[in-house]
Image (tube, rainbow, N blue to C red):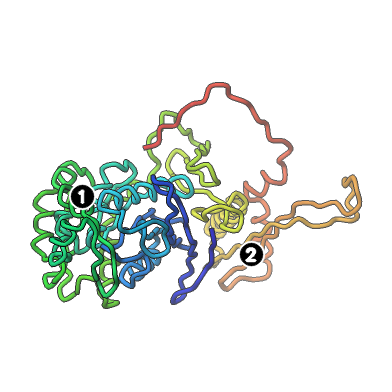
Amino acid sequence: MLGLCYHSKGFTMSRQKFTFKNAQDIHLSGLIELPESAPRGMALFAHCFTCGKDITSASRICRALTQKGFAVLRFDFTGLGNSDGDFSNTNFSTNVEDLMAAAQHLEAKYVAPSLLIGHSLGGAAVIAAASLLPSVKAVVTIGAPSHPGHVIRQLESAVPDIEKAGEVEVSLAGRPFKIKKQFLEDVTHAKLTHHLETLNKALLIFHSPIDTIVPIDEAAKIYQSANHPKSFITLDSADHLLSQKEDAEYVANTLSAWVARYLSVEDKAPASSHTVETGQVLVNEKNHQFLREVFTDDHKWMADEPIKMGGGNIGPDPYEHLLAALGTCTSMTVRMYANRKSIPLEDIRVTVKHQREHLSDCENCENEGSLMDVLHREISFKGDLSPEQKHKLIEIANKCPVHKTLLNLGDIKTQLVEEFIESRVQ
């Protein structure tokens, strides 16, 4: 897996190539984009028929969603883009299987997807896959057909030859593709009605009234078949591929605002069979890498390792938690004292970093040149403060509870609990 960071209008995100195997043991190629901070949710994007993950509309939507705080994986279906396999052996069913494989690998490496987004035939695929993925809370379709068999209209002139010869090379979007009879049979028999009726996920439908590839009537059929909660947003003058940048950005902006209602539950500390008491922290494995869920009695967040360490950078690493504890406690303690003493402190900034320093003359070092952990804390104040007031605030900073705990920590007692208590986090 390769990763890199890039900047877009002051926004930093990381991009990683993501390779995984599907049910047929075929390597599929993906790209995951991660926001700089802990993501609001994990989204999985399915592209349109014969397209690839790098189609302009997909990259624009995914990038805009990442700027809104989502992590997004887009990938090439079997036989397309950089993925292995033979496209002529694929169909709608294999697309759904590829989506399932992508979701499973996301769960293993990062976190299970809570949002599925599908464009055109990819929209039909995410509807079919959503009911099989318990982690998914919301589904979004863009220019999607109500029946996978609708794609046959793009092959209409070649259908008789395909049925007769069993396989025919056709031109789609200016590129040659081999289409087999099994593809026609699969999309014809695939039905979405049952999936829509039993979806039990929030559904958002985007569609353009001037879409010439998939008419807007298809969106109406999807909407009528689905149960609430469901929403429809028209894309006005957009074409099927959302080739205009503003259309793709509009989808991302409205999508992120809409989905906040359905993913906000993840920001709360869920109920667990193992009660988290006040003053206690519970840490659960989220995957078999470094990703962890952290719970207090009222809050939940993620912890992870950076990409360079083999993690997914979904949340702060353990040392960042340690530094944050000292930094936040310092800031809170100083503010509380300044307010109580009416000191005109307008703002306070605290930065903390960790280093291991060589100490050649320390009395308790066993060997000369031993390393000792040192936390460096820098504090700056804004306001009309006298030197005496600044000195007093620094003195108070050194008395913050976490500071005292770190200095006085003489031991960490570890106890083995033989019974594993399953935390049933919802």
| Secondary element at image label 1 | helix
Q: Quadrant of the C terminus?
A: top left
Q: Is residue 123 visible?
A: no
| Secondary element at image label 2 | strand
Foreground: disc 1 or disc 2:
1
Viewer-side residue, 385 vs 75 = 75
Q: Marks 1 and 2, how far apart in space?
A: 65 Å
The x and y percentages for residue 329 are 58, 52
- Residue at (64% x, 56% y) in the render: 397
> Circle 2: is it few (<14), some (14-19), or many (20+) Cα within 10 Å?
some
- Residue at (69% x, 64% y) in the render: 391
Q: Is residue 36 visible?
A: yes
The x and y percentages for residue 400 are 63, 50
Looking at the image, which residue sits at the far top? 418
Q: Quadrant of residue 195?
A: top left
Viewer-side residue, 126 vs 376 = 126
Looking at the image, which residue sits at the far front? 165
- Residue at (61% x, 71% y) in the render: 385
Residue indicated by mark 1: 186
Compared to residue 231, the image places residue 199 above or below, namely above
> Circle 1: is it few (<14), some (14-19), or many (20+) Cα within 10 Å?
some
Residue indicated by mark 2: 379
Amino acid identity at mark 1: Asp
In this rendering, position of residue 107 left or right of residue 394: left
